[in-house]
Amino acid sequence: MALGEVEVRLNENGRAAQTMETLLRQDSSSWRAHLIAAAAYAQIQDYSKAQQHAERAMSLSGANSGAAELLLGQILAAEGNREGARKELQDLVANKPNDPIAAAARQALAGLDKTSAAPQPSRVGAEMLPAFSVTSMRVWAPPDVDAAPPSVSTDVACSDTDVIQQAGLAASRQFQNLERFVATEHIEHEEIAPDGLSTHLRTRDFNYMVFVEQDKKDKQLYLDEKRDGGTGVDEFPTSLATVGLVGLGIDLFQPGFAKALTFKCEGLGQWRGKAAWVLHFAQKPGERSFLRLWQTKIRTVEVPLKGRVWISANSFDVLHVETDLRDPMKELELARDHISIDYGPVEFKKSKTELWLPWTAEIFLDLHGHHYHHRHTLSNYALFDVATDNKISAPKNVPVENDDKPQTDPNQKPQ
C-alpha cells in the first residue's frame, strides 16, 4: 500500500497501477488501494479503469469517501461527462461542506464553469489522498463478507452441486484427521480502542486436542475440544470464551448443518496462491443451523450466519472460511461477529505423515458497543493415534448390558 502511494507521489503512475492491482488481487476490499489505483490510472489517462476504481473506493470508504468523490468528479470531467462531473462535485460540497477536500471540489466546479474544454484530473497531491499514517490505516476488523466480492475467473464454469458434494466428502475425511493430533493452543484476547489501538492484551496457552462424537440417531458428527484435559472455558483469558471455531469450516458441509444453508459457487479464485473454488453461503430465513451459538448465564441464542469459503480446486479441502452475522443481534447487543479461519497441511516428519488441519482462527466482535479481537493459534503439532480396529468382546455366557446412556441431543453442540 505504502509503495503504491509513494509511486503515485513520484509520478511513477504506471508502476503504481501495477502495484495496486497486485494488492487488490489479494484484498479487493481495501478502499485506499482502490483510491490509489484510480489516481494512478487517471494520470496515465486510462479513465475507464480510473472510474471503476474510484467508484469502488467510494462504495467501500464510508466516511472517508471525500477524496474518491473528488477524484471521480475530475475523471468524469476528463472523459467529457461534464454533467456527471458537476453532479459528483456538487454532491460532495453539499454532503461534506466542512470536509477540507470540499474546497478542492469548489475549485473544480469553478473550473468546469469557466472553460468548455474537458479539464484533466489534477496530479494527486496531499489534498487528494488522505495523509498516510499508521493510525489512519488502522482498521479494527475486516470488512463484512458481502462488502466486496472476491476476484474470480469469469470464464470457468462452477457447479454448486459438484463443489459442495466434493467438499462434503473431503470434510468427512478431515474428521478423521482432527482426532489424530494434539497441539499447543495460544489464545489472545484484546480490546480495541476507538482509535483502533489494541488495549488490555491477555493471553493463555493450552494443551489442545479434539474428540469426534457421533449422534446415535442421525449419525451427525460433532467436534468436542479439550483444553488441558477439560473444556477449558473457565480458564480463558477473559469472560468471553470462544470455542469450536476450528471446526466451523468442516461443519459447514455436514448434512445436518448444511441443510439450513444456501450455497452459491461464485467462481474459481485463489487463496495463498492456490486455485480455489469460492462458495458463498447464508442461513435460510426461519431455519436453524446450530452452527453458531451464543451462551450467556441464563440462555443460549443461535446466531444466523452468512459467509464465504475457499475450497481447494484439487483436493476440495477447506483453505479458508469467513463468516459474519446474517443480521445484527439486537437482543445480544451484538453488531459484528466476524470469524476468519485458515486451514492447511501440517507435516509430521517423524512418521512421514501430512494431515490437513486448522492453523489459526480469529474472531472480531462488536459487543455492547465495545470492540474485541480473539486469536487462536495452533503450534507444536504432534500425532496422537489411537488404535480403533481392535474391539473387546463381552465374556462368553455373560449377557451384554444395554447402553443406558442418554442419546445426544442433535441440537446440542459446542459453540
Image (cartoon, helix red, strand yellow):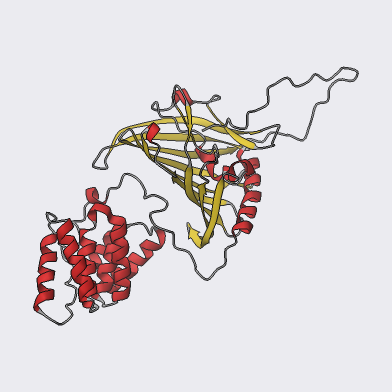
The residue closer to the viewer here, 116 or 14, is 116
The residue closer to the viewer here, 251 or 146, is 146
Q: Residue 46: where, in percent of width, then height?
A: 29, 77
Q: Residue at x 28, y 55 (%)?
A: 61
The residue closer to the viewer here, 192 or 376, is 192
- 280 w.r.t. 119: above or below: above
Q: Residue at x 33, y 66 (%)?
A: 19
Residue lying at the far bottom of the rendered structure: 117
Give the position of the N terminus as an image quadrant.
Answer: bottom left
Q: Residue 233: where, in percent of width, then height?
A: 47, 26
Q: Is residue 80 left or right of residue 18?
A: left
Q: Residue at x 23, y 71 (%)?
A: 84
Residue lying at the far front of the rendered structure: 286
- Residue 1 appears in view: no
- Residue 193 appears in view: yes
- 15 w.r.t. 296: above or below: below
In this rendering, the count of numbered labels is 0
Q: Residue 137: where, in percent of width, then height?
A: 26, 51
Residue lying at the far top of the rendered structure: 398
In which quadrant of the rendered view does residue 364 lie? top left
Q: Residue 98: where, in percent of width, then height?
A: 12, 54
Q: Is residue 77 left or right of residue 379?
A: left
Q: Residue at x 43, y 34 (%)?
A: 187
